[in-house]
Structures are given as C-alpha cells and as structure tokens.
Image: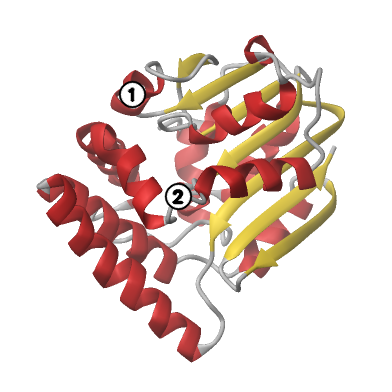
Amino acid sequence: MPDRLRANSENSLMSQPPLRRYAPVNEDRQGYVTALFDRTAVHYDWICRVMSFGSGQLYRRQALARAGLSQAMRVLDIATGTGLVTRAIVDLVGNARQGVGLDASHGMLMESQKGNPFALVQGLGETLPFRSECFDFVSNGYGLRHILDLEYTFREYQRVLKPGGRLLLLEISRPRSRIGFHLTRLYLGKLVPLITRIGTGSRDATLLMKHFWDTIADSVPPEVILAALNRSGLREVERRVFLGIFSEYVGLK
C-alpha cells in the first residue's frame, strides 16, 4: 500500500472499520480479502444468483439506468469481480469497447473473462491506473465495505471522471430497524452461508459469505459515506434506498 494511502487509512475518520477477526490490522486486510476472493471466484456467480433469487441482474440494470448510464458513455467498473455489473452495463451501453473493469483479485478477473466482453485490469480503486478525466461513468458494485479510506478513494473516482461524469456506488447497508437487522442477519449471516456450504462444498466460499455479512453489520453509517463523497468534490450527492438495505449512492462531477 502506498505510504500516502497508509497514512490516510490510519488517520482518516472516513475509513471503514477493520474486522480484526479476519485481518488483524488495516494493512493486512486488502491482501486477506483479495486472497479470499481468489479462492472463491469459481463459486461467486452461483452464490450471487441464489442469494438474490435470480433478480440481481435486473436490479443492476435498473440501478445503472436510474443513475443516468446511457449509450456512448465510456465506463469504468471498479471492484468488477466476475463481471456482474459490467454485463448489465453492456446491456445499456450496447458496446463492450466502451468499458473497463478493474479488480484486485486475479481469480475474479479470470472468471470474468469467461463471459465479460469488457477490457479487464488488475488494480486497486484507491490508486486507479488511468489518466484524469477519461470516463463518463464510474461504478462500484458492492465494494464499498472493503475500502479503507473512503474520501481518498472517492477523490480517485472523481479524478478519472470527465466534467459532467456520473458516479454510482451500489451497496448493501445495515438495516436501521432492529427487526430489519435481525431478519437480515438471519438470512445473510446464517442461511446464505449454510446454503453456500451445501451448494458449493467449499469452506472458503462459506467463509466468504460470513465475511460478507460481517462487513455489512460492521460497516460505517451512510451519513459517513455521503460526507466522504461530498468532501471528494462531487456534486449532487445523494443516497437512494430500496427495501431498507439496498443503497445507491450517486454523484456528479
């Protein structure tokens, strides 16, 4: 991790809380999470499809459309994983040459190559390997919970956006209500890991889904994310919420 990013991660109030039961200190977290995704990439699409009852791709397309994605836009999808968001992007943009998918996990990118027509780059959202003002649209699908320093990272997103460019961050947020929290914990924290273990036979995939819920339960509040987006220089920042847990953070350069 670059010294500047490490310093920001240790000192910034915008950082996501470390999960010490998985990675003891912040500087080890990225490597731990990346390795876990590497080992479970082959199961990832199946888990997402089962977990969302097959509705995930429809929701992704709708969210991208609500955020203003349209044809002829050049798009960067950060934390692209196996390419679930990029496939939805192609459905709307119509030209796979207009997009780039970026992810830290080599295993995820290898899976993405099987059905993703985007150009793929291995890298981190905190240090984007692209020149300034080269994308019309930047997306990040469910990667917010793995960012160590929100404001620093959002400034990178803002940097690569063209003037007038749009940002969309998709995330599952911790439910506000006690009942909603307990129901979501039962499903995501208990049932999904159990179904994953039965369906995949993989201990690592089961651990991934436990980690998935724990990062939701321990995530920073939406107000902190919105503040970081505003401090990064983006405008017209807002959060749209569906079913109490699906958050869409949008902003404009």
Residue with the mark numbered 1: 111
The tag earlier along the polypeptide, 2 or 1, is: 2
Camera sees residue 100 = yes
Asked whether, in this view, residue 26 is left or right of residue 73, the answer is left
Dot 2 crowding, Cα within 10 Å, few <14, some 14–19, many 20+: few
| Label 1: which secondary element | helix
Q: Nearer the viewer, mark 2 or mark 1?
A: 2
Q: Residue at x 45, y 81 (%)?
A: 181
Q: Amino acid at mark 2?
A: Gly
C-alpha separation, residue under disc 2 versus residue under disc 1: 19 Å
In this view, the residue farthest toward the front is 54
Residue toward you, 34 or 91:
91
Q: Residue at x 73, y 61 (%)?
A: 239
Camera sees residue 218 = no
Q: Measuring from the top left, give residue 138's x and y in whole percent.
A: 68, 32
Dot 1 crowding, Cα within 10 Å, few <14, some 14–19, many 20+: some
Instruction: Check contact, mark 2 vs mark 1: CB within 8 A.
Output: no
Residue with the mark numbered 2: 54
Q: Residue at x 40, y 32 (%)?
A: 1
- Please determine whether, in this image, residue 25 is positioned above or below residue 34: below
Q: Measuring from the top left, give residue 85's x and y in whole percent.
A: 55, 35
Asked whether, in this view, residue 65 is left or right of residue 197, the answer is right
